[in-house]
Image (cartoon, rainbow, N blue to C red):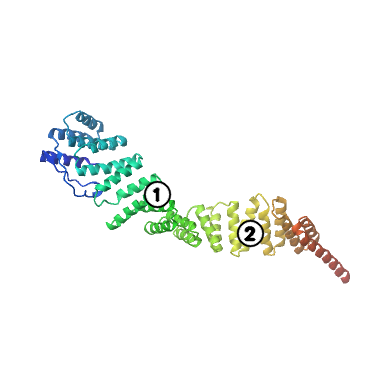
């Protein structure tokens, strides 16, 4: 971020030893080398200036920044300072301000360094890089990008980090299309240099693709994240991307892999996986997973969750297991519709008394979408229980609904005939 005090001391010593003119030859930021250009000749640093800066250095190394600043302030009043001495003074100001987290003051100090004529190229390049980072830190992202691009023009073979900074700056400006090539350049350089691609670089790349709605590319990046950094969040994000790609099978597979590794610990995650099992035609796994989670109170026994659990068991052909969650759901529901569904489950198992009880509960609770159908089902249940008078009453109630009237009257007629047949049979036996 800045020149170290020890590096500064070495530079100052070199200046004094050589005298008159000095060739500045320190590597610029990120270990890049400046392109070969005509060597600049800069004024030498005088010994008395070196001593004053050294005194400020001693104070700074003792964390006595105010004393160091006082010494620099005193030096700044010297009207005989040449451009190189001023540059070193302002460079030192920048270091102290940065150490105190006075970033805007550090920016101004670095700007003063760049304002000096005949600045050594390496110092200019290093200052540009540090200033670009500082502008990023104070959230002036456009200025940070501008300075970094200026630095790129004089840097040779820069490492990946400068491109990451530019990518992050464009991200803050929500300019994702401009950010993307920078992060990809950083990753390419890292691979060429035999360095590992960092996790946060891949995260930025995934974010840019996602914001640009390039879901196939997002998938590729997330697969690499899962391979290199197998974390729950990457599996769940990969599952979400498959949702965007309308690939429910892979959406399920990504979450299932996370589950097998014990990563899914939250109720909503278990619920999501159970829903995907049901949607992908694997209702038994969904029902078993959700039942265990509800029993362990990992998933709340809400109306929607109980309804899903019952539906999963029903779709898996487990009618008996589908009943308890449906009973609980019907009890807490605001209407009687779930009692009708419960009655249907009982009818499938030929449990007519329980079906009749559920249907009466449904009609008493109200809110049934098709009450005529409910009364038909109630009449059929009571008929199977040989409660013909009660069955006739249920069918008569169903005649009040146009879509059920014909069927209800047929049942009533059938019951009337059945009672006549039974009466005749009884007389014949007597």
Q: Residue at x 81, y 65 (%)?
A: 414
Numbered badge on residue 378: none
Choose the circle earlier in sequence order: 1 or 2. 1
At which x and y percent is residue 430? Answer: 89, 70
Q: Give the labeled residue for mark 1.
A: 176
Quarter of the image with the N terminus is: top left
Look at the image and tell me whether residue 196 can be seen: no
Dot 2: within a 10 Å radius of its alpha carbon, few (fewer than 14), some, or many (20 or more) residues? many
At which x and y percent is residue 127? Answer: 25, 41
Q: Give the labeled residue for mark 2.
A: 323
* CA gap, disc 1 and disc 2: 52 Å
60 sits to left or right of 370? left
| Quadrant of the rendered image containing residue 320 | bottom right
Q: Nearer the viewer, residue 393 or 124?
A: 124
**Which secondary structure lies at badge 2?**
helix
Look at the image and tell me whether residue 398 can be seen: yes
At which x and y percent is residue 114? Answer: 24, 38
Dot 1: within a 10 Å radius of its alpha carbon, few (fewer than 14), some, or many (20 or more) residues? many
At which x and y percent is residue 171? Answer: 38, 47
**Which secondary structure lies at badge 1?**
helix
Q: Nearer the viewer, residue 238 or 138?
A: 138
């Amino acid at each position: 971020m800045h020149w170290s005090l020890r590096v500064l001391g070495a530079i100052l010593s070199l200046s004094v030893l050589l005298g008159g003119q000095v060739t500045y030859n320190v590597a610029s930021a990120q270990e890049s080398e400046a392109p070969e250009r005509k060597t600049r000749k800069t004024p030498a640093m005088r010994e008395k200036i070196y001593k004053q800066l050294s005194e400020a250095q001693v104070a700074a190394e003792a964390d006595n920044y105010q004393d160091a600043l006082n010494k620099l302030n005193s030096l700044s009043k010297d009207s005989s300072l040449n451009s190189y001495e001023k540059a070193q003074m302002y460079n030192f100001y920048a270091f102290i301000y940065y150490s105190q987290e006075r970033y805007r003051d550090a920016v101004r100090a670095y700007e003063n360094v760049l304002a000096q004529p005949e600045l050594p190229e390496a110092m200019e390049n290093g200052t540009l890089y540090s200033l670009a980072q500082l502008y990023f830190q104070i959230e002036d992202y456009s200025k940070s990008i501008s300075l970094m691009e200026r630095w790129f023009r004089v840097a040779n073979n820069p490492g990946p980090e400068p491109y990451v900074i530019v990518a992050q700056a464009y991200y803050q400006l929500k300019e994702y299309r401009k950010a993307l090539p920078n992060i990809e350049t950083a990753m390419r350089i890292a691979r060429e240099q035999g360095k590992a691609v960092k996790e946060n670089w891949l995260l930025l790349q995934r974010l840019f693709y996602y914001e640009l709605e390039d879901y196939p590319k997002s998938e590729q990046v997330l697969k690499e994240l899962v391979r290199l950094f197998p974390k729950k969040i990457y599996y769940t994000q990969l599952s979400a991307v498959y949702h965007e790609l309308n690939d429910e099978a892979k959406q399920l597979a990504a979450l299932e892999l996370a589950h097998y590794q014990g990563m899914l610990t939250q109720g909503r995650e278990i619920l999501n996986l159970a829903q995907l099992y049901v949607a992908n035609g694997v209702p038994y796994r969904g029902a078993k997973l959700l039942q265990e989670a509800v029993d362990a109170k990992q998933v709340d026994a809400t109306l929607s969750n109980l309804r899903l659990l019952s539906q999963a068991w029903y779709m898996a052909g487990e009618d008996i297991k589908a009943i308890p969650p449906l009973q609980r759901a019907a009890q807490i529901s605001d209407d009687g519709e779930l009692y009708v569904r419960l009655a249907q489950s009982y009818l499938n198992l030929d449990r007519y008394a329980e079906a009749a009880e559920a249907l009466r509960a449904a009609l008493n609770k109200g809110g049934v979408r098709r009450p005529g159908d409910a009364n038909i089902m109630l009449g059929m249940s009571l008929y199977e229980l040989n409660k013909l008078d009660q069955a006739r009453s249920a069918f008569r109630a169903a005649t009040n609904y146009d879509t059920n009237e014909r069927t209800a009257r047929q049942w009533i007629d059938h019951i009337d005939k059945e009672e006549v047949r039974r009466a005749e049979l009884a007389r014949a036996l007597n």
